[in-house]
Structures are given as C-alpha cells and as structure tokens.
Image: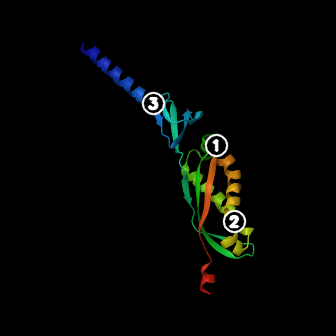
Amino acid sequence: MNARIVTLFLLLVVSLVALTGSLYVVRETERAVVLRFGALIDVDSKPGLHVKIPFVDEVRKFDARVLTLDAPAESFYTLEKKRLIVNSFSKWRIDDVETYYRATGGDENAAMMRLAARVNDGLRNQFGKRKLHEVVSGEREKLMTDLIEELNAAVKQSLGIEVIDVRVKKIDLPEEVSEA
C-alpha cells in the first residue's frame, strides 16, 4: 500500500514537471522562436500560451517593442571638410525574427553594435554630401529621411531590423574651433 502511494506521488510529480516544462507564454511585447536541438522549428510564435517538448525544445524570446540606440558623440566631416561632433540616437525594432536570430544569435547587444556601425556610416555619408549650413538648418529633415531609407534598405535584409527613426541630438564644432 505504501509503495503504491509513493509510486503515485512520484508519477504525479514527474507529470507535473513535464507539464510545466512543456508550456510557455509569449507576451504581446515579445517575439519568440523555438529551437529543437539548435535548429529553428517555429519562427515568430504569436502571443499566447504554447506547447513545446520538454528538455528538447528551447524557446528564445525577444523584445518586440521599439528600442533605443543612444550613440556616443562622433566626428563627421561636411562637404566643405569642416569637422562636426554629432550626438545622435536611433529608434528600432525587430521586423523579421528569423533573420534577426540568424544574424545576431538573438543577442540584443550584438544587434545594437551592428546597427550602431550602420548608423554611424550612414551619418558619415549623409554629412559628407552636405554643406555645414544645410546640415545645421535647412536640410536636416531630408538628411534624416534619406538616412532612414538607406538604413532600412541595408538592415532589414541583413539583420531583420526596422529603423523607425534617427535623430541628431546635438551638433557641435570641435573645441579648437569653438575657442578661436
């Protein structure tokens, strides 16, 4: 009798562990992929309750909200070869979960580093095409629109990321020019 109760209790515990290990929840603010032995089997699980095979399937979740990349101040040259120190930030989100996972391994920091390099290159290109007065006043909105289009063409395919906005927080002249 006692052996039967112990067996039932152990069976109940094992069943409970298997049940809790086989369910996972994807929130509305998340995107998820399911890996079976490291291979993608379910891409972009929708929000809600889902079932997986315990100890075989692994669920990787990513933030689906708009994220901010705050870039450090960088030096750029205008068309007239005038140096500017530019401080900017970008708003981005995951657009294609499968591409994002394959490109970054699901590492948000790796995605941000790669995106920061692209934003930096894009800003360098856009500032290099314009004169100082165009950058400071006249064409800043056009500069940002061109930059966002250029970035999206590059990072949607390669990183699975959509750049929503890029803004320049501050443009300064170098200290040696400001002091003169």
Q: Quadrant of residue 14?
A: top left
Question: In terms of depth relative to the viewer, which is nearer, 149 or 106?
Answer: 149
Please tell me the numbered disc located at residue 124: 2
Q: Are marks 2 and 3 in contact (CB under 8 Å)?
A: no
* Residue pictured at 67% horizontal, 51% vertical: 155
Question: Could you tell me the amino acid type at mark 1?
Answer: Thr
Q: Which residue is mark 3?
A: 23
Residue 152 appears at what percent x and percent y? Answer: 68, 52
First of labels 2, 3 by sequence position: 3
Q: Quadrant of residue 42?
A: top right
Q: Position of residue 26 (x, y in %)?
A: 49, 37
Gap in angstroms between the C-alphas marked 3 and 1: 25 Å
Residue 69 relative to residue 157: left or right: left
* Residue displayed at 66% across by 57% down: 118
- List x then y, in percent, for residue 140: 67, 67
- Work out whether mark 2 precedes mark 1 in sequence or the reverse, and give the earlier one: 1
Rounded to the nearest angstrom, the CA distance separating label 2 from label 3 is 48 Å
Amino acid type at circle 2 is Arg
Name which residue lies at 35% across and 20% down.
11
Residue 121, can we see it? no
Q: Please say if 17 is above or below 125.
A: above
Residue 156: image tag: none
Residue type for callout 3: Leu
In the rendering, at what x and y percent does residue 44 appear? 58, 37
Q: Residue furthest bottom?
A: 180
Pointer 1: what residue?
A: 99
